[in-house]
């Protein structure tokens, strides 16, 4: 019954999106031809344009399907499909312009195609967000639920149950669990957290030996295997019971806490290999998207802000003797050093230090304090982006002294070096810049690296522009201890 409902919802979802594309196209054609030109070319084109629009909407839905827009959405958050919707519709619109140009079947202005792309992308995204919110509300009231059982009663099982409870939008209901013994009498292992509670697993349904009969008696929608390492001998019987009843089965690995969000799998004979340091940016397609965005955005910024760049250069030159651009060695992707550019904000002292700057640092000029306050000294780094040394979004680059120091003290510190460093980043927009915890900064950086999407980049960019550019430097009169760092001296 649940699967039939899902199939019906998917079909309705696709048909409604197709209708949105059709209406967006006709709106765009009317606006471009009738409103802007005052000529009713839409009626003159007649059935050719109608057939072309219907065909285009069909192709558009197929492409959206290929982008996994209509795959199960329970584990996704509202708005997670927005970037993919815009990308899929953009590909369709670009293809349509190419076909019309080559075939010359009908003269449709590029502005009309652009308007239809924007309108359909916005409306489909809004519809999916509203649908997600509606289904979430239904699930909160006990409808459209998926009934799961958990296999295991240890830390992994309780952690999963807690995560399901915290993410109610999934609509997953845990009906109970199977284990060697009831969780109330199971000893807490060393990986358990204070939040792990046996009660979160629900009803104890029996031992592993009871699983087969229980699955035959009640058809659950799915089960999650979350057994501990010492219970691996039960795995063949558990899988056999699940396969006999055809129940959907998911597995939480023993090393879940060390598992990447987007693992890469390989094999050598019968040996399965998992790349524990795999990231979305290891995939050429994702890396290409990010690099293309970096180049286009940097060119746009440098062109639009060229008068501001010239004014800042003059201000730096007049503020104190010395070069306009300050150059400093930083550590980039794969631990390769590069020269990073900034507008000089301090007086030239003849020495380069590895310490941290301070609010009342006597080396800073008044103009330098101003451009640092609003992060305007960072603008030349867009040239670093064009060169390929940096990205617009990513972990902030450090000087070699700090890298060699913190890699010995901060776990997974060098994971940051798997990607290009950025002008701004996830840690910075969450307040971890200047004299803040390097441990927390690294945690945010790794979270960004392991969960990268182009939408994530746009979110960080938005938060940077609207609130993340003001630099609140604090006085730091002591050498930082382990786990602390400050914004290093620029001179």
Image: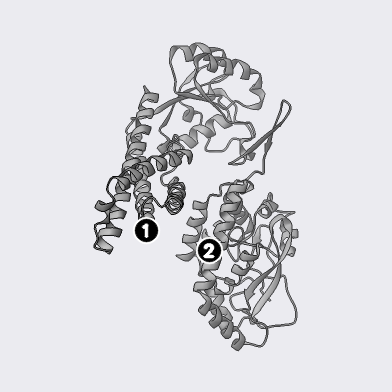
Residue that numbered label 1 is attached to: 109
Instruction: Kindly identify the residue that appears in the image at 49 percent across and 32 percent down.
Output: 161
Query: 77 and 110: which one is in front?
Result: 110
From the image, state whether disc 2 or disc 1 is nearer to you: 1
Residue 249 locus on image (x, y percent):
53, 24
Are there few (<14), some (14-19), or many (20+) residues within 10 Å of tag 1? few
- The number of numbered discs placed on residues in the rendered structure image is 2
Q: Quadrant of the C terminus?
A: bottom right
Residue 440 locus on image (x, y percent):
60, 54
Are there few (<14), some (14-19), or many (20+) residues within 10 Å of tag 2? some
Residue 363 locus on image (x, y percent):
65, 81
The furthest residue to the front: 104
> Which mark is first along the chain, 1 or 2?
1
Q: In this view, does 342 lie to the left or right of 124?
A: right
Q: Is residue 487 left or right of residue 307?
A: right
Q: Is mark 1 on a helix, strand or loop?
A: loop
Where on the picture, by quarter, is residue 432? bottom right
Instruction: Kindly identify the residue that appears in the image at 63 percent across and 78 percent down.
Output: 344
Q: Quadrant of the N terminus?
A: top left
Instruction: Kindly identify the residue that appears in the image at 38 percent across and 52 percent down.
Output: 117
Residue that numbered label 2 is attached to: 297
Query: 104 and 73: which one is in front?
Result: 104
């Amino acid at each position: 019954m649940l699967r039939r409902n899902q199939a019906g919802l998917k079909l309705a979802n696709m048909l409604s999106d197709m209708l949105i594309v059709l209406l967006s196209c006709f709106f765009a054609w009317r606006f471009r031809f009738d409103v802007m030109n005052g000529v009713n070319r839409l009626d003159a084109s007649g059935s050719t344009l109608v057939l072309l629009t219907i065909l285009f909407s069909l192709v558009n839905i197929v492409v959206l399907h290929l982008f996994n827009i209509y795959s199960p959405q329970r584990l996704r958050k509202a708005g997670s499909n927005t970037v993919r919707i815009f990308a899929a519709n953009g590909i369709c619109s670009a293809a349509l312009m190419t076909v019309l140009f080559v075939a010359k079947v009908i003269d449709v202005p590029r502005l009309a195609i652009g308007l239809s792309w924007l309108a359909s992308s916005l409306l489909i995204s809004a519809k999916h967000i509203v649908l997600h919110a509606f289904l979430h509300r239904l699930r909160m009231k006990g409808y459209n639920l998926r009934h799961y059982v958990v296999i295991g009663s240890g830390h992994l099982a309780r952690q999963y149950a807690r995560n399901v409870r915290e993410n109610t939008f999934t609509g997953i209901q845990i009906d109970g669990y199977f284990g060697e013994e009831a969780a109330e009498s199971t000893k807490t292992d060393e990986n358990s957290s204070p939040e792990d509670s046996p009660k979160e697993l629900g009803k104890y349904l029996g031992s592993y030996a009871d699983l087969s009969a229980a699955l035959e008696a009640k058809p659950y929608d799915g089960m999650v295997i979350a057994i501990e390492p010492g219970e691996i001998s039960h795995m063949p019987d558990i899988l056999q019971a699940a396969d006999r009843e055809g129940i959907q089965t998911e597995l939480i690995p023993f090393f879940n806490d060390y598992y990447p969000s987007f693992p890469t799998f390989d094999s050598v004979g019968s040996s399965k290999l998992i790349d524990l340091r795999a990231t979305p940016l290891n995939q050429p397609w994702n890396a290409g998207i990010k690099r293309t965005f970096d180049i286009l955005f940097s060119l746009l910024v440098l062109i639009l802000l060229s008068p501001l760049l010239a004014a800042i250069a003059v201000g730096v030159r007049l503020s104190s003797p010395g070069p306009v651009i300050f150059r400093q060695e930083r550590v980039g992707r794969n631990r390769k050093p590069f020269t990073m550019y900034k507008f000089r904000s301090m007086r030239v002292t003849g020495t380069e230090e590895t310490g941290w700057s301070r609010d009342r640092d006597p080396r800073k000029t008044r103009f330098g304090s101003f451009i640092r306050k609003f992060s305007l000294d960072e603008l030349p780094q867009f040239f670093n982006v064009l060169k390929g040394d940096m990205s617009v979004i990513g972990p902030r680059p450090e000087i070699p002294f700090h890298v060699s120091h913190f890699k010995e003290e901060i776990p997974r510190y060098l994971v940051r070096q798997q990607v290009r460093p950025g002008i701004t980043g996830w840690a910075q927009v969450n307040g971890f810049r200047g004299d803040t915890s390097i441990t927390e900064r690294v945690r945010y950086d790794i979270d960004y690296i392991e969960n990268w999407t182009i939408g994530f980049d746009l979110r960080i960019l938005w938060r940077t522009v609207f609130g993340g550019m003001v630099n609140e430097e604090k006085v730091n009169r002591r050498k930082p201890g382990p786990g602390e760092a400050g914004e290093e001296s620029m001179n």
